[in-house]
Image (cartoon, rainbow, N blue to C red):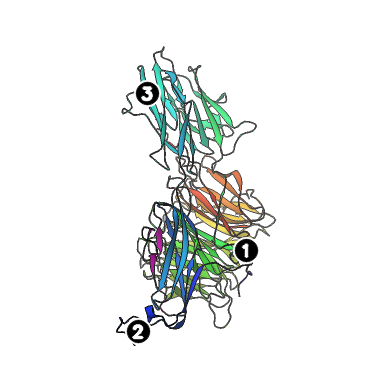
Amino acid sequence: MRRAMDRGIGATNGVALALCVLLSACSSGGGGGGDNVPTCVSSTVSVAIEPGAPTVVANTPQPFLATVTGASNTGVTWSVQESGGGDISPTGVYIAPAPQGTYHVVATSQADSCVSASIAVTVVPAPTITVAIDPPGPVDVEVQGSVRFLATVTGSANTAVVWSVPAGGACGQIVNGVYGAPTTPCVAVVVATSVADPTKSTQAEVHVLASTPSALISPTAVTVGLGGQLQLALSRDIVSGGWMVEGVTNGNSTVGTISPTGLYTAPFQIPAPTTMVNVTKTFAPNSSSAVTLASRFLPAETLHVDDCVPQCAIDEPNSIVAADFNGDGFSDLATSNAGTGTVSLLISADASHFAAPTRLQVGDPSTGDPQALVAERIDQGSKFDLVIADADLTVSPSRVAVRTRLGEGDGTFGATEGATALPSNSNPLSMAVGQFDSNGHLDVAVANFKTNTVDVLFGVGDGTFPVINTITTGVSAPLGLAVADVNGDGSEDFAVANSGNDTVSVFLSNGAGAFASPQIIQLPANSSPTAVAAVTLNNGDNYPDLVVTTTGSNGGVTVIFNSADGNPLADPRFDALGPSIATGSFPVAVAIGNFNHDATPAPDVVVANQGDDTVTTYFFDSVDNVLVQSETYTVGQTPQALAVGDFNGDGWADVAVANRGDDTVSILRNRGGPTTTSP
């Protein structure tokens, strides 16, 4: 009952059938006194490997998935055909060798050792990385002065460099490319070293010359992402006088603000008509800092959720999660694909790219219909597991279920799929993990669109959910679900976005697995809420608030503040309904992250707009307690879901978007930048 038809040519995964004949090399008994070896006979066992014929960069990992059919034992033994052709783990994680070439990964059935599949792997060398610096030097600068250097890295998608001045800072220091001279003349060497390849670097000589001391602002030129912060410094103290941005004392929300100590905070939107602002200080007339304002995220990168050549069936990714599945410090991704009944795994190979995707089958190969996905440590281990809501439409027998795959910790997942049955035709479309009882184990809440219910599945710490509590009141065509302790009693509660009656329902847990009658938050008529997120927006309390996306005539983003009165066990009062904030067309998903590393820190918001193939970012203004629209980015076709993670390990939150219309994931990498806290 697949929702989408194949686009054409089928998958080209390596497949082998046991079509063995009696050969002298695989016969047993009879004649010649030869050694006894197993006889290969005709068999229906087959092995397939995914992905097919990938290209892998030398010394990087590539996970493989083997599917065995025709045998109850679906295990395989992995090997590499060529000596020196790389290594592969028992779970199928291949590490490419340093020499380039074509090698063959082999998966041999453990049920029938005569049956195997082989995939050709093309290993290519990493591109040659070069670093150039501008100005190339030598450069003259006065004592306590500064000079801005720019580094250009070619041959790698990761263009970051580490700046340094050898000799322990005796002849100045460099931060973010801005060299600051010491108080005495000297000759310094500025070095820019590639982050992608620390063996690649370049340098420029700086001559520090004596001069009459004057107050200088540093850095003199810098790029700051929207909403970011930069601590400006003076070469000598000036007790009197204030800071100005574009001639405005203390700045403003259009050009950015600056504190009395020189902490500059960039605006949430790029001002028109210029992208550069000048920061000055009274009684330092000969110095300024030119701050170039830039988008918070870089242009979107595109990943495919399958690696079929030329094409797989239509995948239709509809949910996405980010988690470190292999423990390398980079967030990885998984998408649920309604079109093929699969989950795609996209593992971060390094700080700049992802390995080719692999896919896991969900439920029945013909009718599995994954609609929601969660990554969490449901078996109390250190490894992330997958929880999948399967809306299989089979009527008899019903196959609707919450399915689990336990993580191995190396980017792969166990072959055994756990299943907890849900009511037939319930159509679970949203899911979240929380702790709703007192046993210390994670539970799962599932919103069922067709039956107007929420099923709470109580975990016991081993990845199973033997007890279910079905909630039948206060739910109408639910599309979104969020978990948080909204009343501060130590037990997690949940909120449901109800598209059927333009409401949000909040269910309070008693900590023992039961829930009170919901508080119903009425939205404007014809709002059609599609998603909800819980986040503390720092509006004077520590209680989680709600952010809701709506698609109707009053569509947009709405913040519903939790106005609990400060009693730690107070009932939440979600009665502060904010105005609808503009989004793109047809917003269907919302996610939370501190994208600008502000000092509050106030979480920020990103929304996926399905109608115009964009995502929109918002920053929370903790001064005025309002959510402010920032920028809109173009992504793939029909964006359906969002995930926030750190895909390059730089400590800044990035965004991933699952695009249902073209079977892709868009990656928005955070620009990063200087971040400080006001003294």
Q: Is residue 85 magenta?
A: yes
Task: Judge by depth and name the residue closer to the eye, 380 or 394.
Answer: 394
Q: Disc 2 residue type?
A: Ser
Q: Is residue 379 magenta?
A: no
* Residue reaching furthest to the front: 32
* Residue reaching furthest to the bottom: 30
Q: Could you tell me which residue is drawn at 40 percent across and 19 percent down?
A: 207
Q: Quadrant of the N terminus?
A: bottom right
Give the mark nearer the N terminus: 3 vs 2: 2
Q: Are marks 1 and 2 in contact (CB under 8 Å)?
A: no
| Local secondary structure at mark 3 | strand
Q: Quadrant of the C terminus?
A: top left
Q: Count residues near mark 3 (Cα–Cα under 10 Å), then give few for <14, some for 14-19, many for 20+.
A: many
Q: Count residues near mark 1 (Cα–Cα under 10 Å), then give few for <14, some for 14-19, many for 20+.
A: many
| Local secondary structure at mark 1 | loop
Measured as percent of width and height from the top left, residue 76 is found at 40, 72
Q: Count residues near mark 2 (Cα–Cα under 10 Å), then give few for <14, some for 14-19, many for 20+.
A: some
| In this rendering, the label closer to the viewer, 1 or 2 | 2
| Residue segment shown in magenta | 72-96
Report if residue 274 is visible in the image: yes
- Please give the residue where the numbered disc 3 appears in the rendered image: 188
- Please give the residue where the numbered disc 2 appears in the rendered image: 28
Q: Disc 1 residue type?
A: Ser
Report if residue 464 is visible in the image: no
| In this rendering, the label closer to the viewer, 3 or 2 | 2
Q: Could you tell me which residue is drawn at 68 percent across and 57 percent down?
A: 552
| Local secondary structure at mark 2 | loop
- Please give the residue where the numbered disc 1 appears in the rendered image: 499
Task: Judge by depth and name the residue closer to the eye, 468 or 163.
Answer: 163
Q: CA distance from mark 3 to mark 2?
A: 78 Å
The number of discs equals 3
Measured as percent of width and height from the top left, residue 136 is found at 46, 26
